[in-house]
Amino acid sequence: MQNRLYAGQSCSIARALDVVGERWSLLIVREALLGATRFDEFLRNLGIARNVLADRLGTLVHGGVLQRVPYQERPLRHEYHLTDRGRELVPVVLALMQWGDRHFAGPAGPPRLAEHDGCGGAARSGVHCVECDRELTPTEVTTRFNPVYVPKR
């Protein structure tokens, strides 16, 4: 990764932010989740500068979130498709959207609704215990150091 911002930190969040933590990155992922695949679509939908978009797409490709796929040979042009790693960001994007809806939605409510394709019910992100499968509140979750983790030097 070019310019790893959090290189000295031994933290999975910091390593993830090196790939998706820049201001435009999750918006690019959001657009890809909504079906955008081409550079010009991202450009039009986001209103982002070309050079910034090219840099962020490169970081997302290098980080395994997007894959460049040729769609035209003369001149050579590529689309950007979400990888499995990129699709795994759905709960992250959904959780951030829900948080924004809860705290920053205007009087008309949230601009988008997340729904289950199968039945049309509302989709929401949450935290569940893998042992008892109970949904947890933020105050019921703690983290601790992994006793077998050995940081890379």
Image (cartoon, helix red, strand yellow):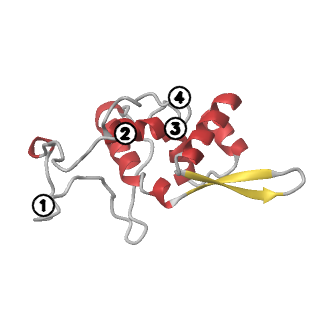
Would you say 71 lies left or right of 13 here?
right
Mark 1 vs mark 3: which is more N-terminal? 3
Q: Do the residues bearing badges 3 and 2 touch, measured as CB atoms within 8 Å?
A: no
Report, in whole angstroms, how far the alpha carbon at label 1 lies from the one at label 4. 40 Å
The nearer-to-camera label among 3 and 4 is 4
The answer to whether marks 1 and 2 mark residues whose Cβ atoms lie closer than 8 Å is: no
Percent coordinates x, y for residue 90 in the rendering:
41, 53
Q: Write down the residue under mark 2.
A: 109
**How far is mark 1 from mark 3, CA to CA?**
32 Å
**N-terminal label among 1 and 2:** 2
Image vertical order of residue 7 relative to residue 126, above or below:
above
How far from the left and from the top, in percent, is residue 72? Answer: 82, 57
For the residue pair 14 and 119, the one nearer the viewer reads as: 14
Look at discs 1 and 3 and give the one toward the viewer: 3
Q: Earlier in the sequence, mark 3 or mark 4?
A: 4
114 relative to 43 in the view: left or right:
left
Residue where numbered disc 3 is placed? 25
Residue appearing at x 59%, y 47% in the figure: 61
Q: Where 101 falls versus 8 (above or below)?
A: below
Q: Residues within 10 Å of mark 3 (few under 14, many from 20)?
A: some
Closer to the eye: label 1 or 4: 4
Could you tell me the amino acid type at mark 3?
Ser
Lower sequence index among marks 4 and 2: 4
- Give percent across and percent down for residue 1: 54, 38
Vertical placement of 133 versus 57: above or below?
below
Say which label, 3 or 2, has the lower sequence index. Answer: 3
Secondary element at tag 3: helix
